[in-house]
Image (cartoon, helix red, strand yellow):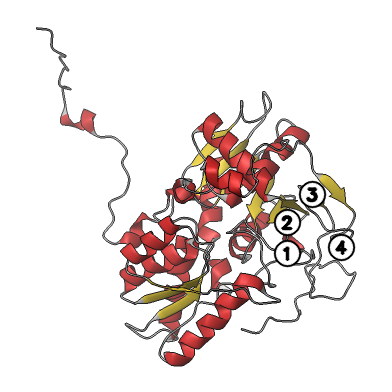
Amino acid sequence: MNSLHVAAPPSPARLLAPAAAAAHTPAGLVGDTPVLWVGEPFTDPGRGFWAKLEGCNPGGIKDRAALYMVARARERGELAPGAPIIESTSGTLGLGLALAGVTFGHPVAVVTDPGMEPLMRGLLNAYGAEVHLVDRPHPVGGWQQARREKVDELLIARPDAWCPDQYNNPDNVAAYAPLAHELIAQLGRIDTLVVSVGTGGHSAGIGRVLRGFFPALRIVGVDTCGSTIFGQPAAPRLMRGLGSSIYPRNVDYALFDEVHWVAAAEAVHCARALAKARYASGGWSVGAVALVARHLSRVSPAESRIAAVFPDGPERYVGTLFDDDWCRTHQLLGGPSADVPDELAHPGERVVERWSRCTTVADPLATVGVAVTADEDAVVGVAR
């Protein structure tokens, strides 16, 4: 009978190998996520980009923001020991807050809407979060505003509770400095950063730090059709995790060199193609970011180093983006794949319904027709 014989090394030291750090709390599992080269066959031969795989965090990219916002609020005395945390979420921040609740000892309640995947609701319940569901969108602010109004109701009922207000909390921006430092350590030089934009937290937090190291850095924001962030009118949106029906004040308009809007079917097609080609994918944001990053790798000099941030992984989307029946129901399959974006001279030129690009980036709440510059810090706020 044949057996496999493995020779013992002459010294136990030969057994030592790099290993992941041991963690004493769940928060210790967050950060130091890998980067993956995304090349052919997903991209053209000889071209590609680096993807920061934030889905390798326990819950996704917003683990970083949730832990940081909670820690800073505790330090300032805004969040008392054991007090409830209440916030609106489409999913990923909810997982991060559940993680922060376990880490710091706070009950967590999240407000979401019917678009949240059943898997995500199940995970939030499993991790001890209380899930509240709104049943109809706000007539102007959509599901986001409806969720925020429900948060306000819960805060009135629980005067000791604290809300992170992810859309306007500057700690949501500061939380992502470590991610930027990780990218610098991993890639050395970065010429282009591609980031999805929702609350504005990770795009501003990563972009500001990287721009300090690389003044010529090109920063490309990725939004969704139907989102108001960059000056388009609000419309019903199937995509979650990027885009907004309100105007988050964490969005740093002065950072962006250009913005792309991506339609739902285009994001689905790209997320699926990416999974098959590179065994890495994610949800709406990942599909949209990958579409734009692939395009930039095609039109940029071959030596250009592009970093794209993938906010989550594919698991929560098995019953949606990666389910043929669900996609057929929402008419997301069978259309032609997009190769190049439409071009807009300014964000208000026309309503976009497919992948589109604009190099004029303006704050919709600033003076009409005036592009935002680094000196224009005073803007109209959004009431909670």
Residue with the mark numbered 2: 225
Residue with the mark numbered 1: 235
Q: Locate the N terminus by quadrant.
A: top left
Q: Earlier in the sequence, mark 4 or mark 3?
A: 4
Q: Locate the C terminus by quadrant.
A: bottom right
Q: Residue at x 49, y 75 (%)?
A: 87
Dot 3 falls on a residue whose secondary structure is strand
Numbered disc in front, either 2 or 1: 1
Depicted 78 relative to depicted 131: above or below: below
Q: Residues within 10 Å of mark 4 (few under 14, many from 20)?
A: some
Q: Earlier in the sequence, mark 3 or mark 2?
A: 2
Relative side of 348 to 141, left or right: right
Q: Earlier in the sequence, mark 4 or mark 2?
A: 2
Q: Residue at x 59, y 39 (%)?
A: 50
In the rendered structure, are the residues bearing label 2 and label 1 in contact, judged by CB atoms less than 8 Å apart? yes
Type of amino acid under label 4: Gly
Numbered disc in front, either 1 or 4: 1
Q: Residue at x 46, y 55 (%)?
A: 60
Type of amino acid under label 1: Ala
Q: 285 and 123: which one is in front?
A: 123
